[in-house]
């Protein structure tokens, strides 16, 4: 008698996967409906582990304040650390403060500086990343870990491959990011894994004024709209 091709319970897994589609669709619909009403925003990314009073926390607050004072809303991942700093700066400047929170077992929780009607909760990282990419007019990337790098390189890849429109990607903190940028320029470029013009997709700065100046200059020649 021929043995089963699939282990016991395989059909049950397939059924559960099919039903998950509706939950995924629900997150997309809710996200699109809410985010489409908010207006031009810039996303701020960075470590959830950065504490208030730390150099980059306070710098992220200042960046968000400058952005909000210049008319941009601020989107973060909704949690602690740099995310909290971004929402805090936008809130203190009286600007739009959006949080795209993700359900994680340990470190993630809503920070108190998100506008009450602009806090969205997600179970799926990929749905959440679509919201960042679709509705951000720029990415401001503070020092962070794997999650920050994931969001950074996803945006670069989508722009490089023309899957979305170009928008500013700004790394804040020369001392933190210069090693990565040197490796990209020497190793990746020399191996011809990227093109010289790909380097133009990324700007490296140290001050809030530089962040705002880059975004303002970009949108003098581009329309603010969703990126796809």
Image (cartoon, rainbow, N blue to C red):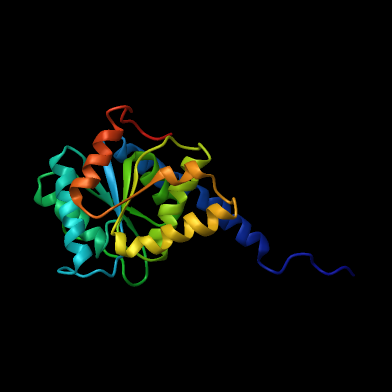
- Asked whether 112 or 216 is in front, the reply is 216
Return the x and y of residue 186 as percentages of the image width and height.
Answer: 50, 58
Give the residue at x 14% y 69%: 53
In which quadrant is the C terminus drawn? top left
User: Left or right of 164: which side holds 61?
Assistant: left
Residue at x 40%, y 64% (from the top left corner) = 179
Q: How many marks?
A: 0
In the image, taking residue 29 as reference, residue 220 lies left or right, namely: left
Q: Is residue 192 left or right of residue 63?
A: right
Percent x, y of residue 216? 24, 35
Viewer-nearest residue: 191 or 87? 191
Location of residue 118 in the rendering, given as x and y in whole percent from the top left corner: 23, 46
Residue 216 appears in the figure? yes
Name the residue rendered at 19%, 54% in the picture. Answer: 87
Looking at the image, residue 36 sits to the left or right of residue 208; the answer is right
Measured along the vertical axis of the image, is residue 5 above or below residue 117?
A: below
Q: Residue furthest bottom?
A: 106
Work out whether 105 lies above or below 138: below
Percent x, y for residue 188?
54, 56
- Is residue 23 visible in the rendered image? The answer is no
**Residue situated in front as seen by the camera: 86 or 208:** 208
Residue sitting at 26 percent across and 34 percent down?
217
The quarter of the picture where residue 108 lies is bottom left
Q: Quadrant of the N terminus?
A: bottom right
């Amino acid at each position: 008698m021929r043995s089963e091709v699939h282990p016991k319970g395989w059909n049950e897994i397939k059924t559960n996967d099919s039903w998950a589609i509706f939950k995924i669709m629900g997150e997309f619909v809710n996200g699109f409906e809410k985010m489409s009403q908010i207006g031009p925003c810039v996303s701020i990314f960075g470590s959830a582990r950065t504490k208030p009073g730390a150099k980059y926390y306070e710098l992220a607050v200042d960046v968000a304040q400058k952005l909000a004072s210049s008319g941009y809303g601020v989107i973060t991942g909704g949690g602690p650390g740099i995310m909290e700093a971004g929402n805090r700066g936008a809130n203190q400047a009286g600007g739009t403060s959006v949080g795209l929170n993700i359900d994680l077992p340990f470190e993630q929780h809503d920070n108190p500086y998100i506008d009450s009607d602009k806090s969205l909760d997600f179970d799926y990282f990929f749905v959440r990343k679509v919201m960042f990419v679709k509705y951000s007019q720029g990415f401001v990337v503070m020092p962070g870990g794997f999650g920050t790098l994931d969001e950074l390189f996803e945006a670069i890849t989508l722009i490089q491959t023309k899957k979305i429109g170009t928008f500013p990607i700004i790394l804040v903190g020369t001392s933190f990011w210069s090693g990565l940028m040197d490796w990209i320029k020497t190793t990746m470029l020399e191996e011809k894994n990227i093109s010289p013009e790909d380097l133009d997709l990324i700007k490296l700065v140290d001050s809030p004024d530089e962040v705002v100046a880059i975004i303002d200059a970009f949108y003098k020649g581009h329309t603010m709209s969703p990126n796809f």
